[in-house]
Amino acid sequence: MKTLSTLMLGATGGTAAWLINIPLPWMLGPLILIMVLAICGVQTRINRLGNRFFLGVLGFWLGSRFEPAVFQQVVDWYPSVLIMTLSVILIILVNTLLFRWLAKLDLITSIFASLPGNLNAVIIMGEQLGGDGRWIAIAQTLRITLVIISTTVIFFLMPEYDLSGPAIDSQQSQSLLYLPLVPLAWWASRWIRLPMPEFLGPLLASAILASLGFNTDLPGWVMVITFIVLGSYIGGRFYGTRIKQLLQVSFYAVLATLLAMLIAAGFALMTYWLLDIPFSHAFLALVPGGIGEMALIAASADIDPLYIVFMHIIRMFLLMFATPAIGRYLSTRVPRQSER
């Protein structure tokens, strides 16, 4: 029932955002409204399994936009991977120094509040090493939320991009027959230990079907529901956050996010100058947001999302390997909070 009531509130926020012409209304509307209500103490919650299913639907929708010819470009993107790696390292270093020196946090909390990686894994590992889980959780949640909102606004202000989102229509209804592939692809991806299986599995399944000539593009109303679920889930993460805590963390989190986006923009310019990849593509590939949300912005702006998805997957892999190594190093060199 809590999920249903939250989705009804999210749909209300999406409708209001659509009426007043906010960019990506069916995602930002629910996100902003649910976030405000959650901070004010209204119990908001989206079932985690339902959120993962619709994250898979988003992946399936994005995969339907791929063309076989684009996959041939992947081998030419390794210089972009090097630039992305440098940008991630610089973002982590700069934000760690910000949290350490300005916010006066301990080293473990500062590092894990700065890692642009998987939200849950970063919070859990940071707490296990003795970091302040409250700071890490709020800083990471604010980072993702602020990146989504600000990146959407940036592209909305560019006249060549249309971020109105999908229309509510009943076309492509035959594609609904493909929806059972979403949980099947998710299960198969978990079996082969693919990272973020609920998203990447359906994306790969849809991309393969699209490359074979099948039309897997989903109806607009399905995607509207998907955006409402995903936006409401992100906004609901703020439930339980006291306003005093949020105000205490938000200044530094906003500053850290701003610095991260400026660094991403700088390296995006470098990518454009050196590799002749459009700035908009490079920026979405380098900005430290969620893989699904950045790919969604790309698709909504009629930018082929393959490059953006590829770069964020590589970033995810790098952080998957680097984060445990950072944790092991800190566990032997830095005493836990309780031991100080």
Image: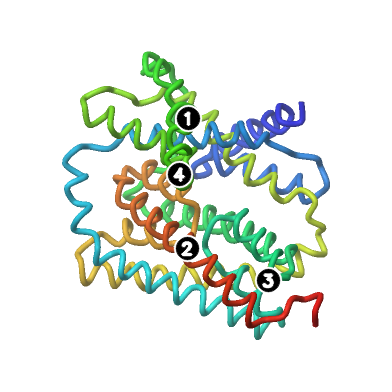
Q: What is the quadrant of the N terminus in the image?
A: top right
The mark nearer the N terminus, 1 or 3, is 1
Tally the numbered discs. 4
* Residue displayed at 68% across by 43% down: 33
Q: What residue did someone put label 2 on?
A: 319
Residue 89: x and y, percent?
A: 44, 74
Q: Amino acid at mark 4?
A: Arg
What is the number of the mark on residue 251? 3
Left or right relative to 167: residue 83: left
Mark 1 surroundings: few (<14), some (14-19) or many (≥20) residues within 10 A: many
Q: Amino acid at mark 1?
A: Met
Residue 171: x and y, percent?
A: 38, 17
What is the number of the mark on residue 193? 4
Q: Secondary structure at mark 3?
A: helix
Q: Nearer the viewer, mark 4 or mark 2?
A: 4
What is the number of the mark on residue 70? none
Q: What residue did someone put label 1 on?
A: 223
Q: Are marks 2 and 1 in contact (CB under 8 Å)?
A: no
Mark 1 vs mark 3, CA separation in Å: 34 Å
Mark 3 surroundings: few (<14), some (14-19) or many (≥20) residues within 10 A: few
Of 263 and 125, the residue lying toward us: 125
Left or right relative to 99: residue 301: left
